[in-house]
Image (cartoon, rainbow, N blue to C red):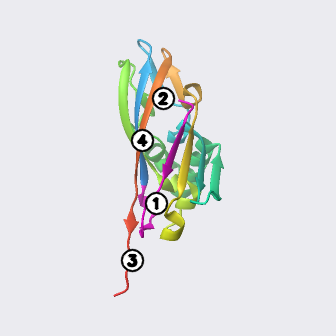
């Protein structure tokens, strides 16, 4: 890991609803024999920084220490009772690679509401969203995962973004 994922939104005339839009991630984690891996903190542990900028390059929001922000956001908005379900959506025991597997692929979803400019329940206008860039700086394997009974050797990340767009029209 330690790379960057950048999305440029080409939404046309759609209004974006951030809380129901999401980033789907597929992780293929490779561990040594009898190894297991779990997120260090939460699904935000994959990223060090998330930056959102307009099509002209003006920075709209930046979140450094993304894992810490996600933890605080979930606990403040949903309470501690829902923390494990939202912070670790792959499986509920926080482990993404069981101890019996050497290679394991896991899918999970991260709502865009974990990024501050998408957290409100209002629609974002197409003038703002069209051409918007979302940059995810990936963290290192050592910072993202905690290995138990072995070592985490590699993590391949594939992602896709699903946007909930609405078109408004006068009748």
Q: Which mark is residue 58?
A: none
Q: Which mark is residue 159?
A: 4
Apparent side of residue 74 relative to residue 102 in the rendered image (left or right): right
Task: Return the residue at label 2.
Answer: 38
Asked whether the beta carbons under mark 4 and mark 1 sit within 8 Å of each other, the answer is no
Residue 19 bears which disc, if any? 1
The earlier-in-sequence mark between 2 and 4 is 2
**5 is within the stretch colored magenta:** yes
The kind of secondary structure element at disc 2 is: strand
Task: Name above or below for residue 120 compared with residue 146.
Answer: below
Q: Residue furthest top?
A: 33
**What distance separates the C-alpha of mark 2 from that of mark 4?**
19 Å
Chain part drawn in magenta: 1-21
Based on the displayed image, in which of its 4 quarters is residue 116 positioned? bottom right
Q: Badge 1, how many Cα within 10 Å: few under 14, some, many 20+?
A: some
Residue 168 tag number: 3
Count of number-bearing discs = 4
- Disc 3 versus disc 4: distance between alpha carbons? 29 Å
Give the distance between the C-alpha atoms of the residues marked 4 and 1, in whole angstroms.
18 Å
């Amino acid at each position: 890991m330690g790379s960057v994922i950048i999305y440029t939104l080409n939404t046309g005339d759609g209004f974006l609803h951030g809380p129901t839009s999401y980033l789907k991630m597929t992780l293929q984690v490779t561990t040594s024999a009898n190894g297991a891996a779990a997120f260090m903190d939460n699904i935000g542990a994959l990223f060090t920084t998330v930056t959102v900028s307009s099509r002209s390059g003006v920075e709209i929001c930046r979140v450094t220490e993304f894992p810490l922000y996600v933890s605080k956001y979930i606990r403040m908005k949903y309470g501690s009772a829902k923390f494990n379900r939202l912070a670790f959506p792959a499986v509920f025991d926080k482990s993404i690679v069981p101890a019996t597997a050497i290679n394991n692929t896991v899918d999970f979803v991260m709502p865009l509401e974990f990024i501050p400019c998408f957290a409100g329940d209002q629609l974002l206008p197409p003038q703002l969203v069209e051409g918007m860039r979302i940059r995810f700086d990936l963290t290192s394997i050592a910072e993202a995962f905690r290995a138990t009974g072995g070592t985490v050797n590699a993590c391949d990340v594939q992602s896709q973004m699903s946007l909930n767009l609405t078109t408004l029209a006068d009748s």
